[in-house]
Amino acid sequence: MVRIGSIKRFLLLRFFHFFLKTDDNPDGKDISFFDEIIQSIKNDRFAYISKFLNDFYNIDESPNKLASDEVVRFSWNVAANASPIATISCVSAWQTDFRKDLRKISITSLIIQGDDDRILPFPVTGKKMHDHWKEVN
C-alpha cells in the first residue's frame, strides 16, 4: 500500500452558502419561493414531504436506481415524524446567509455535488460555494 498523505481533518456536509435572492445574491430564490413552500407544508405536510423526496431522490427519472422503495419510505417516515413546526423552520434556515461562516472554514475542502440536484441545484449552490471559497482563500 502506498501512502501519499494523511487526512488530519475531514468535513462532510450538505450545505449551501445562501439561497435567498438579494442584491448581492441575484441568482438566489425570491422570498415568494419560500412562502409557497411554507404554505404547501401548512396545507398538507405529508404531500409536501412526498414531493420533496421525489425531487430529492429523482424518483420519476430513475425509480429504484438511486434509492429503493424502502429507503424512500424510511425517509418519508423520518420526515413525517418530525414536528410540523420544525419542518416549517427548515425553510427559514434555507434563507440564512452562511457566507461569513464559510470564511471560517480554513481546511482544504472538496465539494462533491451531482449535476441533477433538484433540491440544491449546482449552479446556485456548489458552484457558488466553490467561487466564494476561491475569493476567500
Image (cartoon, helix red, strand yellow):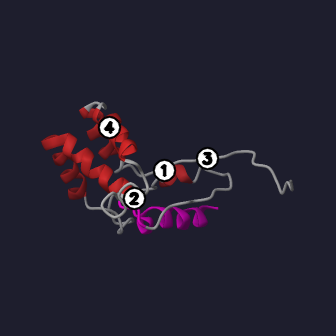
Residue type, mark 4 in image: Ala
Judge whether 74 appears above or below 30 on screen. above
Looking at the rendered structure, the secondary structure element under dot 2 is: loop
Magenta span: predominant SS is: helix
- How far apart are the alpha carbons under marks 4 and 1? 17 Å
- How far apart are the alpha carbons under marks 4 and 3? 24 Å
Where is mark 4, residue-wise?
Answer: 79
Residue type, mark 3 in image: Leu
Task: Report x, y in % for residue 75.
Answer: 36, 41
Please name the residue shown 51% across and 52% down the image. Answer: 100
Task: Report x, y in % for residue 80.
Answer: 28, 35
Neighbor class of circle 1 (other Cα within 10 Å; few <14, some 14-19, many 20+) is few
Count the marks: how many? Answer: 4
Q: Are marks 4 and 1 in contact (CB under 8 Å)?
A: no
- Along the line of sight, the residue nearer the viewer: 55 or 87: 55
Instruction: Point out which mark residue 120 bears.
Output: 2
Answer left or right for 122 relative to 110: left
**Residue 94 appears in the picture as rendered:** yes
Q: Would you say residue 62 sits in the magenta stretch?
A: no
Answer left or right for 21 relative to 8: left
Pick the quarter of the image with the C terminus. bottom right
Q: Are marks 4 and 3 in contact (CB under 8 Å)?
A: no
Q: Are marks 2 and 1 in contact (CB under 8 Å)?
A: yes
Q: Which residues are magenta?
A: 116-137
Please name the residue shown 35% across and 50% down the image. Answer: 94
